[in-house]
Amino acid sequence: MAEESSNINGFAWFLAGLGVGALAGILYAPKSGRETREDLANSAREGSEYLRTRGQQVADQVGTMVDKSRDQVGEYVDRGREVMDRGRAQWEEFVERGKSLVGEQGRKVSDAVDAGRQAFRSATTTGASTASSTTGSGTGYGAGASGSGSGAFGSGSSSTPTPTTGGSGV
């Protein structure tokens, strides 16, 4: 902190010395007062003109940069919108695909349940009609004591023997 104040203090003395040196140079110049005043006025005009033209150049450059920045931001916004639109379209496509998959699986499950009900009904009506028949050769659900045969849910063999009615029905 003390170092900063000494730097500022040193800079202030430098500027003061520069001002005193310029004043001494003007006072001891080989030109007359009128010529010196005219030189100072011309220098001031030239300096103000330089600052004016330089300021205009800087303003033009800043305007150009602002225009370029505005164009770039517009491009980035457009790209962002395109990416969002593409993402939204993909998302909607995935949702629709998911909906159709769920609907298809629901139909398959519903068809399977209906097929199971139908098979159960046909098995119970077949079993009831077989059990009530008087031919004496049938069994309720299987084809004899071995347990192999076809039922409501496909064919196969069972490890448990199927009960027989002995021809008298149930």
Image: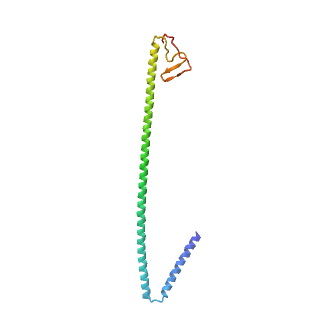
Q: Residue furthest right?
A: 3
Q: Is residue 119 above or below residue 91?
A: above
Question: Percent position (x, y) of residue 67?
Answer: 40, 63
**Quadrant in which the N terminus is drawn:** bottom right
Residue sitting nearer the eye, 69 or 168? 168
Identity of the residue drawn at 46% across and 25% down = 116
Q: Is residue 150 above or below residue 49?
A: above
Residue sitting nearer the eye, 144 or 102? 144
Identity of the residue drawn at 42% across and 76% down = 50
Residue sitting nearer the eye, 104 or 25? 104
Question: Percent position (x, y) of residue 98?
Answer: 44, 39
Identity of the residue drawn at 44% across and 86% down = 36
Colour convention: rainbow
Question: Percent position (x, y) of residue 66?
Answer: 42, 64
Question: Percent position (x, y) of residue 86?
Answer: 42, 49
Q: Is residue 11 above or below residue 72?
A: below
Identity of the residue drawn at 44% across and 31% down = 108
